[in-house]
């Protein structure tokens, strides 16, 4: 078992290579991460594996899993997204970055827009962070990656006007005047 310090150190080491090592009866797999000269054992729950397969085989409309993103780590995915037809974002392409902690599904994944094209939307900060309740206080282990994707599609589709969400730093600076 790794100490918290060892886990932090393992996250800092690059490059990272991941490959399945052996399967266990409870559905989890033991995997090895090859870092610079060290091998670290990590457990991945069956739930994350199932959700990855579900997203690959039956993605929500307008979304596709970037296969290259999961080659190095099962805990970080990039999902390519197209704006839904008939919405303000029709024809636009976006990328979502999903990061899963070791406590997933009990903790929500970190989800944010990444890349060059971040949507202009009242619930999306300019740095790509998404203001969506199911990603914070309304998260439930019953939710899945697909339900998060559908919520983001719905959030963008229901937008009536492209408006920039004012970042907290701007509000603080304006309040100081």
Image (cartoon, rainbow, N blue to C red):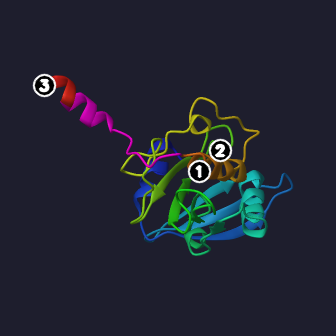
Q: Is residue 10 visible?
A: no
- Gap in angstroms between the C-alphas marked 2 and 3: 43 Å
**Which one is in front in this view, the residue at disc 3 or the one at disc 1?**
3
Looking at the rendering, in which quadrant would you find the C terminus?
top left
Q: Residue at x 48, y 41 (%)?
A: 123
Q: Assess disc 1: are there few (<14), some (14-19) or many (≥20) residues with their C-alpha within 10 Å of its C-alpha.
A: some
Q: Residue at x 47, y 46 (%)?
A: 161
Residue 162 on the magenta span: yes
- The residue that disc 2 covers is 104
Residue nearest the viewer, comparing 104 with 88: 88
Q: x, y (%) of residue 162?
A: 44, 49
Name which quarter of the figure residue 18 lies in: bottom right
Q: x, y (%) of residue 4?
A: 49, 42
Tell whether 1 sits left or right of 122.
Answer: right
Q: x, y (%) of residue 45?
A: 73, 52
Earlier sequence position, callout 3 versus callout 1 = 1
Residue 129 on the magenta span: no
Residue 177 position (above or below residue 7) = above
**Which one is in front in this view, the residue at disc 2 or the one at disc 3?**
3
Q: Residue at x 71, y 63 (%)?
A: 61
């Amino acid at each position: 078992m790794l100490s918290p310090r060892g886990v932090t150190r393992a996250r800092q080491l690059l490059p990272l290579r991941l490959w399945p090592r052996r399967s266990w009866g409870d559905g989890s797999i033991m995997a090895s991460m090859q870092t610079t000269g060290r091998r670290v054992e990590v457990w991945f729950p069956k739930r994350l594996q199932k959700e990855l397969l579900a997203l690959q085989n039956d993605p929500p409309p307008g979304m596709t899993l970037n296969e290259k993103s999961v080659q190095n780590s099962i805990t970080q995915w990039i999902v390519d997204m197209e704006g839904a037809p008939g919405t303000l974002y029709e024809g636009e392409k976006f990328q979502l970055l999903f990061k899963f902690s070791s406590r997933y599904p009990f903790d929500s994944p970190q989800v944010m827009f990444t890349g060059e094209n971040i949507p202009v939307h009242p619930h999306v900060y300019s740095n790509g962070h998404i203001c969506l309740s199911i990603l914070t206080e309304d998260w439930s282990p019953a939710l899945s990656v697909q339900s998060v994707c559908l919520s983001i599609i719905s959030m963008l589709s229901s937008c009536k006007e492209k408006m920039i969400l004012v970042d907290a730093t701007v509000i603080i600076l304006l309040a100081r005047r």
